[in-house]
Image (cartoon, rainbow, N blue to C red):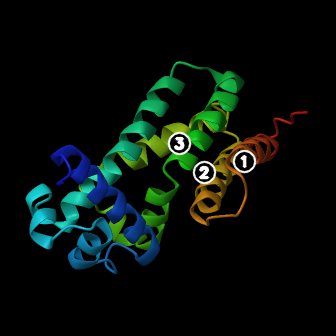
Amino acid sequence: MPRPPSTMRRHILDSALRLFAEHGFKGASLHDIAAEAHCSKASLLYHFASKDAMLTELLTPPAESLRALSEELAALDGDRAVEPAVRGYVGLAMRFHLEIKIIFAELPDMLGHPVLAVIPRAVDQLADALAGRSGRPRARVMAQMVIGGVAVTVAADVDVEQDTMRAELIQGALRTLGHLTS
């Protein structure tokens, strides 16, 4: 029995996500994706015009989620922004760990992707919140360390239970930012 179109489309995207994360965007072919999704290449192309169309659909939710987080954090002043920024960013990074892995695997090419155009401004806004809206060099550097450290850690497929990973990322980020927690 054939799958409904929306189910098949999601299955193809899930297959593409796994393959892009494992082999890179360039390393995964349409044939590989169709085989992983247990469909024909024609069926794949019925749902998606190209491999790039799949990538765009996969990268849109994390890019938009980061932009939305940055907008939420904009209303918070100073140190009140730090913990919500850490918790929000860690949550997004864990939710989109495979997408982050894809971006890091081919960073120069990925940063030029149109759907990611919102990322630089959103990352700047996130860094500002993580720094507690401070212009001090130490606060700015620590904020960038948290952004990079969390992204690299979730993309590395560390063999740690998800709740433990989330808690340790939050605690480590808060410590890095000088917000010691119990």
**Residue at which label 3 appears:** 92
Task: Choose between 13 and 97: the one closer to the eye.
Answer: 13
- Counting other residues with Cα less than 10 Å from the Cα at mark 1, is it few (<14), some (14-19), or many (20 or more)? many
**Residue at which label 1 appears:** 169
Task: Choose between 165 and 182: the one closer to the eye.
Answer: 165
Check disc 1 and give the amino acid type: Leu
Query: Residue 51 location, x and y as percent?
Result: 21, 67
Q: Residue at x 82, y 43 (%)?
A: 175
Closer to us: mark 2 or mark 3? Answer: 3
Query: Residue 131 location, x and y as percent?
Result: 66, 38
- Earlier-in-chain disc, 3 versus 1: 3
Q: Residue at x 62, y 51 (%)?
A: 144
**Residue at which label 2 appears:** 147
Residue 52, quarter of the rendered image: bottom left
Task: Choose between 146 and 131: the one closer to the eye.
Answer: 146
- Earlier-in-chain disc, 2 versus 1: 2
Q: CA distance from mark 2 to mark 1?
A: 11 Å
| Image quadrant in which the C terminus is located | top right
Q: Against 111, is 10 above or below?
A: above
- Counting other residues with Cα less than 10 Å from the Cα at mark 2, is it few (<14), some (14-19), or many (20 or more)? many
Closer to us: mark 2 or mark 1? Answer: 1
User: What kind of element bears circle 3?
Assistant: helix
Look at the image and tell me whether residue 116 can be seen.
no
Q: CA distance from mark 2 to mark 3?
A: 11 Å
Look at the image and tell me whether residue 128 can be seen.
yes
Looking at this rendering, what residue extends furthest in the bottom direction? 27
Query: Residue 141 location, x and y as percent?
Result: 68, 51
